[in-house]
Each structure stands twice: as C-alpha cells, then as structure tokens.
Amino acid sequence: MITVQEHLCRIVDSVQRLPPVGLDLLEAQGCVLAQNVTSQVPLPGFRNSSMDGYAVRGADLVTASPAEPVTLPVVRDIAAGNTETLSLAPGHSMRIMTGAPMPDGADAVVPVEGTDGGLLEVSVSAPAAVGQHVRHAGEDIAVGDCVMGDGTRLGPAQIALLAAVGTGQVRVTPKPRVVIISTGDELIEPGTRPGFGEVVDSNGLMLTAAVRALDCTPVRVGCVPDDAQRILSTIQTQLLSADAVITTGGVSMGAYDTVKEVLSSVATMRFDKVAMQPGMPQGFGVLGENQIPVFTLPGNPVSASVSFEVFVAPALRLMAGRAQQETTMVTAVAAHDWAVPAGKVQFARVVLSRAHSGDGCGHTAALAGLQGSHALSSLAGANALAVIPAEVTLVRAGDHVNCHPLGPILEAP
Ligand code: AMP
Ligand code: MG
C-alpha cells in the first residue's frame, strides 16, 4: 500500500508542460501564454476625449462663470474614427465625441452637460482645467511594455487586452488532448436503458465532462470489452494522438481485470494499492514513443471521479502550464458524526454550506448520502470532498474537516 501523496508525487514528477503552439486569440481561450507579449503600440493609441463635449483651450475659459459665460465658435465636429490631423486655433472650439482624437492645441474637454450644447457656437459657464476629460496616448500601455507574461491564463479580459495591442496569434501551451477509454464486458452506450447485468458507461461521460470542465480537450473512445487484445490495441492506437490517456475499470483483484493484466508487464507502468477510500486500486505510467501519461482508474464511478480529482486533474493542469491546484481547501465544521476507514484517507462526499454563527461566517459539512463507491447519487448531490486523514477513525460532530470544493458553496438554508 502506498500513500495518496506518494502516488500523486510519482504522477506529477512524470508529466511536463506541453510544447507551445501558435493559435488565434479566440482559439487560445483558456490556454496559458507560452511567451511574453510586448506592445508595439501605445494604449490609448492617440490622445482622445473621454466625454462627449467640446475640445477647448483651457486658457480661453479662465473667466467663464454662470454670470458671465464665455462663448466660443464651434469650428467642426470630431467623431470617433476621425483620422485627420486637426488643430484648434485659440479662441475656438470643436464639438468632440467620446474616443475621438483631440485636435492639436486643445488641452481640455468641456462635457456637453456643462454647456448650452450649441452647434455653431457654444456657451460655457465654468473654467476647464487643463487635461480634464482627456485620455493621454500610452497612459494605459506604453510602447515596449510587457503587456502579458508567460504563464498567464487567457480569459475574456486577457484576450481583449491582447487584441487591443494588435495581437492576432499567440504562442500558448495547448489544452491537453485526453483520451478516455472505458473497459468492461457489462458496459453499454449511454442513452440506452440498461437491461439485467448491463451497466451504462457513466464513467466515460463523467470523465469527458470532467476533462472539459477543466478546460482540456476530451476524446471519448467509448466502451471496450474485457479482452486483452482489444484493450491493448485501443490504447496503442490512441497513444499516437493523445497527450494523456485515462482508462476506467479492470485494475482490481478480480479475474477479469484486464487492464492490469495487459499493462502490468510494461516496465513503465505501476499498479498500486493507494491508502484511500474510495479509489484504492490505481495504475499509472508512461507509454509509447512519446511517453504519454496513462492513468488506469478503478471502474466504480465514485472511485473514478475521486481519482480524477485527486490524481488526474493536477497532472493535466501542469501539462496545460497551470498550477497543480487551483482551488483552496475550505475548513468546515462536521454537522454530524461519521465513520472513517482505519489507515486510509477518506474522500467523503459532502454538502458544504456557508453558515452564519455568533462568531462570524463559517462552513459546515454534512455527508451527501450513501457513501459506497458505486453510489452516484451522493456524488451528484455533493459539492465538496471532505479529506479525512488516514489516522482519523471517526469524525465527530463539531470536528474541523478539510474540504476540497467541487462546485459552488451555497448559504445554509
Ligand atoms: P472494475 O473496476 O472493472 O472491477 O469495475 C468495478 C465496478 O464499476 C463494477 O460494478 C463495474 O460495473 C463498474 N464500472 C466499471 N466501468 C464502468 C463505467 N465505465 N461506467 C459505470 N460503471 C462502471
Ligand atoms: Mg470490470
């Protein structure tokens, strides 16, 4: 038996950030930059108005007051998109729109609200401070600034900034392409009602969805029966185009545990009992010319799901150039007693709620339902895994438990 930490360390030590590729900005959403991006342009690109109003010379308005407004002729309009070089003569004004280039000579904008809104001439009843409502070229980004560093994850805001400085393509770490293979004679395709002895391949869909939720690219191969040759050839074929392979089923101690049977003779694969519940039988290794990481997860749906969270997701994040963990653990108060297996880390499916008590805001954790490793209902009803250390044998109501969130944490009713 090895510890969860030992198994995880072996995995993270064997995976690497994927080599970079060039992608169009939108295709790169969710990816991590594999370059520093330096701006060739200033942002704003030119001096422009931040208000609809009148471009003026502040010096012309120093005496303006409600009692004695100053009237200036309006020479022309400047709309956003104007590309002419304009110059404002002393004693004049130009009607200007938000984002339009400031004419040379003008040093302030009087918002339309502070005027009579005149078209041929405008009456202004207050002085204008030099620089008011003017955005300066380069005040946000200067030419030569590093606008974004290697390792930055590209979300909507990052994509907007890269687009604004004129970037079309970026070098990024691609999203790992993750092949998902379900093994078992009993498995049938999702979308069919299972007959006696049949089991729907829920693992295949769960892992496909989990890989997608992690912002990686799932490739679901489907169900392969417990046939050594078929399992081996499916894995070998998929190794040619996969960045990682996940199998489920066939790694326990049973007679038809074929995944283990076909891969345990491979020197780069290891099959271990990991001191955890659920998820004890685990296999991991690298296969093929490209040393592709292969995770052979147990078939029980909850075991497969917990194994993905605990072992596969950290590896995929590292391959994608991200941090191994992206969520922080939440400490909660156990809402009731529950039993814990001796000598194993328990990953209990819990409902984690935010609770208000006398001493402020805290969290509570209550078991989500039947805890067997086959019980999908409690997995679907849980929003966290309470991680109970191996030395604990009983959780008592009121104990502090460490929880790994799986979804949003709601207010307790
Ligand atoms: P195994 O790990 O192959 O011994 O399977 C353990 C349990 O998980 C058995 O009850 C299987 O029927 C079930 N199981 C295996 N693979 C899947 C799958 N892809 N989807 C749902 N249940 C599965
Ligand atoms: Mg099986």
Image (cartoon, rainbow, N blue to C red):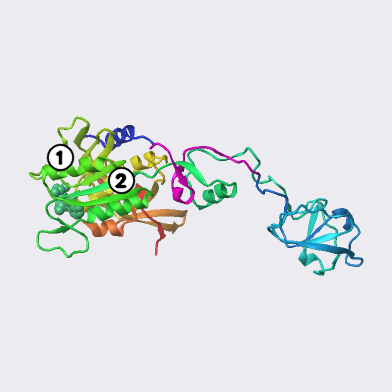
Q: Residue at the spot x=57%, y=48% of the render? A: 161
Quadrant (top left, top right, bottom left, bottom right) of the C terminus: bottom left
Helix, strand or loop at disc 2?
strand
Work out whether residue 342 can be spotted: no
Q: Amino acid at mark 1?
A: Lys
Q: In this picture, which residue range is highlighted in magenta?
A: 18-41
Q: Amino acid at mark 2?
A: Val
Residue 274's disc number: none
For the residues labelled 1 and 2, the Cα–Cα distance comes to 20 Å
* Residue placed most toward the observer, 323 or 230: 230
Q: Is mark 2 within 8 Å of ligand 1?
A: no
- Residue 332 is a magenta residue: no
Residue 224 drawn above or below residue 195: above
The tag earlier along the polypeptide, 1 or 2, is 2
Q: State the residue position of label 1.
A: 260
Q: Residue at the spot x=9%, y=45% of the render? A: 256
Return the x and y of residue 14 as percentages of the image width and height.
31, 33
- Residue 22 is a magenta residue: yes
Q: State the residue position of label 2.
A: 178
Viewer-side label of 1, 2: 2
* Residue placed most toward the observer, 97 or 402: 97
Looking at this view, name the residue that lies furthest to the top: 267
Side of 231 relative to 210 (left or right) = left
Return the x and y of residue 35 as percentages of the image width and height.
50, 37
Residue 115 drawn above or below residue 232: below
* Residue count near mark 1 (Cα–Cα under 10 Å), binned few <14, some 14–19, many ≥20: many
Return the x and y of residue 10 as percentages of the image width and height.
29, 33
Q: Residue at the spot x=72%, y=48% of the render? A: 136
* Residue placed most toward the observer, 9 or 73: 73
* Residue count near mark 2 (Cα–Cα under 10 Å), binned few <14, some 14–19, many ≥20: many
